[in-house]
Amino acid sequence: MNIKRHFPVIFFLILILLSPSSYAATGVLDLTATTASLACLVIFVLAYTLVILEEKIHLRKSKPVLVAAGLIWILIAWQYTAADMPELSAEAFRHTLLEFAELMLFLLVAMTYINALEERRLFDGLRVWLVKKGFSYKQLFWITGFLAFFISPVADNLTTALLLCAVVMKVADGDKEFIGMSCINIVVAANAGGAFSPFGDITTLMVWQANVIEFFEFLVLFFPALVSYLVPAAIMSLFIENKKPQNVIEEIELKRGAFRILALFLFTIATAVVLKITLHLPPVLGMMMGLGYLQFFGYFLRMTLPGSLARKRALAEQSGDTQRLSRLGSVVPFDVFSRVARAEWDTLLFFYGVVMCVGGLGFLGYLSIMSDVLYNDWNATGANITLGLISAVIDNIPVMFAVLTMMPEMSHGQWLLITLTAGIGGSLLSIGSAAGVALMGQARGYYTFAGHLKWTPVILLGYAAGVVTHLTLNSHYF
């Protein structure tokens, strides 16, 4: 992975360093030109360089940003303590930590539900159903793409991409070209689908919890997001052979309670939305209540397991199904906390490190400088489109958190625009989104950086079409 591809983030940090220190800092003190504050910038650049090189050096991305966050806030506190104002830096840290805590607990509940559904084999059931239908490659290309687009608003783009990549690899059975193109299609679709829902991506969740865009207002991004997916998908589909894969026979039995857990997940989302809209309570409250729903249902599953197994064992003995009897003998009780343990902790800890690093740089005043350069020297439309492109290189989480920390004065249409571009911009490169990075590991040798890069011009065309669609259809928001 060449560091030259990550030049934009370095460019903006250099731009900050060269900017006059007379800008108003976010904190009480203007520390943007001090040696310690400049050291914070260097620490962040070094940490993020290690994040960028994760695939090459095999160092989990959470490790460097966790250390960097600690060092940055130590340097901030040292400067404020020297100025006899230690309570201000401590309060700023707590404020940033609270923002992260709300998002982390929200994501933890969502991940727990997804892991529970996976354990109940719901996703395996979907995969087997698609395999059995005997679709052609071209049909499978479109079906998996649309499933990615419509599942990711609920299950998030990373989980959706992993699920559908497994489907494609099972059906295509070693067809390198088709698997590679399908993975690109899935990444683009999942990222686009995640852009019009607070649950589709971490960035949209951040925007919703910051009270910048209301829940149902995200839906105005549906058509721009759809267009951003359809344009590259339509062009790519022209290069898909219209042949059928071999039909692989496989039987999957869903575990007890799979659909009820899905219903509880939807009810949990509804709880979070209703509490946010009616009582203005943070969405995390509704999600944590939803974790309680799942725990109660897990208790029900454990208490009723012996009776359920006895009935199934009797039926299997009557029919002489020895394989089913063997499977019943290996059944273990459902455990909610084992699902919590399987959450993407590296992602959550990476998220903590990024939020605390960017929050620290914002408190020092550097984001104020960047905001002035982007949104005053430039214009909001150009800045938001550019930031969307940059998110393909440095990940959309720090980009969106930086924008929310800067909180520039711009119209509702512009906030919708940066939400859209941060979501779909990550599709331009395979390393631009969590979905793309995950699939490079899952479909190693089939889906590669170079293979994705070959279709980047087509994806960029879709990015431009999505932006134009938003500027046209939602012009009354500007």
Image (spheres, rainbow, N blue to C red):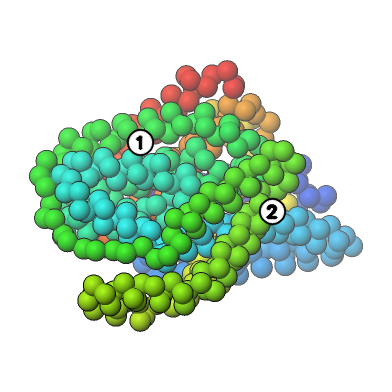
Closer to the chain start, of discs 2 and 1, is 1
Displayed quadrant of residue 237:
top left
Q: Give the x, y percent position of residue 319.
A: 23, 72
Question: Which residue occupies 55% across, 68% down?
Answer: 300
Which quarter of the figure has residue 105?
bottom right
Helix, strand or loop at label 1? It is helix
Q: Residues within 10 Å of mark 2 (few under 14, many from 20)?
A: some
> Visible in this render: residue 209?
yes
Given the current orientation, which residue lies at the most extreme front position? Answer: 318
How far is the residue under mark 2 from the one under mark 1?
33 Å
Q: Are marks 2 and 1 in contact (CB under 8 Å)?
A: no
Question: From the viewer's perspective, is residue 220 above or below residue 47?
Answer: above
Left or right for 234, reference 122: left
x and y, in percent, of residue 155 in the image: 46, 51
Q: Position of residue 189 (x, y in %)?
A: 36, 42
Which x, y percent locates residue 415?
A: 59, 33
Tell me the quarter of the picture where residue 176 sits.
bottom left
Q: Which of the numbered marks, if any, corresponds to residue 354?
A: none
Tell me which amino acid carries mark 1. Tyr
Kind of element beneath mark 2:
helix
Q: Amino acid at mark 2?
A: Leu
Is residue 453 visible to the viewer in this orientation of the structure? Answer: no
Which quadrant does the C terminus fall into? Answer: top right
Q: Which residue is mark 1?
A: 229
Look at mark 2 in the image and give the residue it sits on: 285
Image point (18%, 45%), residue name = 135
